[in-house]
Image (cartoon, rainbow, N blue to C red):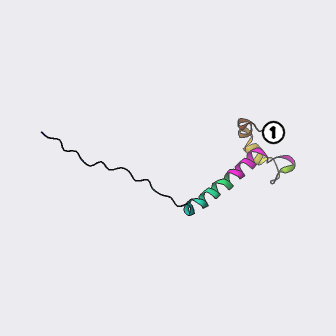
Amino acid sequence: MAHTALPQSRPVPVRIPVRELLPWTIFAGVLALALIYFVGAEQGATSLISGNTVHEFVHDARHLLGFPCH
């Protein structure tokens, strides 16, 4: 029995144009900045939303990430 070698095909990397990636990168950056603001700074004098609702919602995340809140 003779074994014949099958041709090996290499996977071709998919090219993603920057023009298609840029809007998603900007969206993720804005979302990350909003998340950091609400977790790290949404309280007291810098509060954009009145009341303690946002503060209490992200309270445990503040402690987990090391942001002071008391």
Count of labels in the image: 1
Is residue 48 toward the left or the right of residue 17 in the image?
A: right
Residues drawn in magenta:
32-44
- Where is residue 39 shown, x and y percent of the image? 74, 45
User: What residue is pinned by disc 1?
Assistant: 69
Magenta: main secondary structure: helix
Q: Nearer the viewer, residue 48 or 6?
A: 6
Q: Nearer the viewer, residue 70 or 28?
A: 28
* Quadrant where the image shows the N terminus: top left
Q: Nearer the viewer, residue 46 or 26?
A: 26
- Which residue is rendered at x = 76% and y = 44% of the image? 40
Q: Secondary structure at mark 1?
A: loop
* Quadrant where the image shows the C terminus: top right
Tell me if residue 12 comes above or below residue 3 in the rendering: below
Is residue 17 toward the left or the right of residue 42 in the image?
A: left
- Where is residue 37 shown, x and y percent of the image? 75, 49
- Where is residue 46 shown, x and y percent of the image? 84, 50
Q: Nearer the viewer, residue 39 or 54?
A: 39
Is residue 48 toward the left or the right of residue 35 in the image?
A: right
- Which residue is rendered at x = 71% and y = 36% of the image? 64
Find residue 65 and report its image quarter: top right
- Where is residue 8 shown, x and y percent of the image? 30, 48
- Which residue is rendered at x = 45% and y = 56% of the image? 14
Q: What's under tag 1, amino acid-wise? A: Cys
Residue 42 in magenta stretch: yes
